């Protein structure tokens, strides 16, 4: 097979950190806050701007709280697990590595006893009807390492007694999140918006705030985990007074991404861009017998972290990934280390559809090259 002549203009298909927005130029970032304290008037202003823009663009209800927290999405999930769990039973739903990690934290670190594991293998979604409305539930909206997402939140009861804790790091700004069903939602800047790492976002419903104010876990809480003081929420966290010192250049970078989302039409445009990108891969897979989507049910297939399995041995898949990178046709598209051998192609809204279209002939070529 002859080598393709057209390469993706932006061969950045990593699932995190993800591609910067089209037209990105670090020189265009607003640098007014650089070298300034995050406690200064301008520091607080830009942090509040990041919160307000996030809330507006995602359509988060007015009575929900949004805050910037340390340690990316992982930090956001950890702080809420340590802060809120133990008040009642917990259902942990997982079908990939990060969700399984939350189960490990709940059982091995928090050492909670009343925990139900609801799981499925890579490529499948577990039976979510097993979730007990009387329990708290922890789940990922989109399994970043399996390419399997929940298609909706119909399985979450409107009369639930527990709170829902949703890791939405590869779903926020790419999928429609039903906020009325989500009590705690977390995401990070470096996923769908192509921002920088190290900072997370936490979204709290009034029910989650009530839990934080009324439940006092019998465990130490490190400073960076503390969302309350006494019986009250630390309000400053949700008004730009971060728990610890943030990177102000990362904040400026995040605001640049938010401004871009606003300029292209907002959340629905981002959802449409991801769907269009994933559709190119879906068509590619449908026309070939040597590649399959890891997601068994198309209704659960991710539109961001699209995971593929190939009719190749694992070492040849790795050779294919290296070959594509050497040709500057695709960077960082190998499957996650705990997932089945294959490819993982990021299709979030900061990726241009024409680059996905330019990529797929290279997948054919690389497959033919490594078959031997």
Image (tube, grey):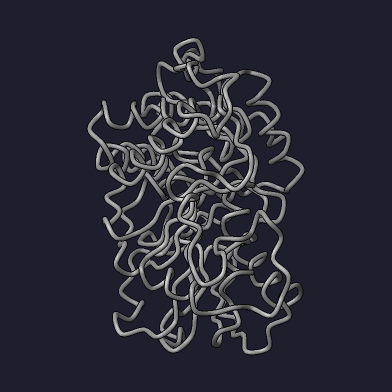
Q: Is residue 364 visible?
A: no
Residue pictured at 67% horizontal, 46% vertical: 312
The quadrant where residue 330 appears = top right
* 325 shown above or below 233: above
Residue pictured at 47% horizontal, 76% vertical: 211
Q: Position of residue 47 (x, y in %)?
A: 46, 36
Which is nearer the eye, 18 or 1?
A: 18
Which is nearer the eye, 136 or 333?
A: 136
Q: Is residue 182 visible?
A: yes
Rendered-image quadrant of the C terminus? top right
86 sits to left or right of 135: right
Residue pictured at 49% horizontal, 26% vertical: 253
Badge count: 0
Q: Position of residue 56 (x, y in %)?
A: 28, 44
* 368 shown above or below 315: above
Q: Position of residue 200 (x, y in %)?
A: 54, 47
The quadrant where residue 227 appears = bottom right
Rendered-image quadrant of the N terminus? top right
Q: Position of residue 18 (x, y in %)?
A: 53, 34
The quadrant where residue 230 appears = bottom right
């Amino acid at each position: 097979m002859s080598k393709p002549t057209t390469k993706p203009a932006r061969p950045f298909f990593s699932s995190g950190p993800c591609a910067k927005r089209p037209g990105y130029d670090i020189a265009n970032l607003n640098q007014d806050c650089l070298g300034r304290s995050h406690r200064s008037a301008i520091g607080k202003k830009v942090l509040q701007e990041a919160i307000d823009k996030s809330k507006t663009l995602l359509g988060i209800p007015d009575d929900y709280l949004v805050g910037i927290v340390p340690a990316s999405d992982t930090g956001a999930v950890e702080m809420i697990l340590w802060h809120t769990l133990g008040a009642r039973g917990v259902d942990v739903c997982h079908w990939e590595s990060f969700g399984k990690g939350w189960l490990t934290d709940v059982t091995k670190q928090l050492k909670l006893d009343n925990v139900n594991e609801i799981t499925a293998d890579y490529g499948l979604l577990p039976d979510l009807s097993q979730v007990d409305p009387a329990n708290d539930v922890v789940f990922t909206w989109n399994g970043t390492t399996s390419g399997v997402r929940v298609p909706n939140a119909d399985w979450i009861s409107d009369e639930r007694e527990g709170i829902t804790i949703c890791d939405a790091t590869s779903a926020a700004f790419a999928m429609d999140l039903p906020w009325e069903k989500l009590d705690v939602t977390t995401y990070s800047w470096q996923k769908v918006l192509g921002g920088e790492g190290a900072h997370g976002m936490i979204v709290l419903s009034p029910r989650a705030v009530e839990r934080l104010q009324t439940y006092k876990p019998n465990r130490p809480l490190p400073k960076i985990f503390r969302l309350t003081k006494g019986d009250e929420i630390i309000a400053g966290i949700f008004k730009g007074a971060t728990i610890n010192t943030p990177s102000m250049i990362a904040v400026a970078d995040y605001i640049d991404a938010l401004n871009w989302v606003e300029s292209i039409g907002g959340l629905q445009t981002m959802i449409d861009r991801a769907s269009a990108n994933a559709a190119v891969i879906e068509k590619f897979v449908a026309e070939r017998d040597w590649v399959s989507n890891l997601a068994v049910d198309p209704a659960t297939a991710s539109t961001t972290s699209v995971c593929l399995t190939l009719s190749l041995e694992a070492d040849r898949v790795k050779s294919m990934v290296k070959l594509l990178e050497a040709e500057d046709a695709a960077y960082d598209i190998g499957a996650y280390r705990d997932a089945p051998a294959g490819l993982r192609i990021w299709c979030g809204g900061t990726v241009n559809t024409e680059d996905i279209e330019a990529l797929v002939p290279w997948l054919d070529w690389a497959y033919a090259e490594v078959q031997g």
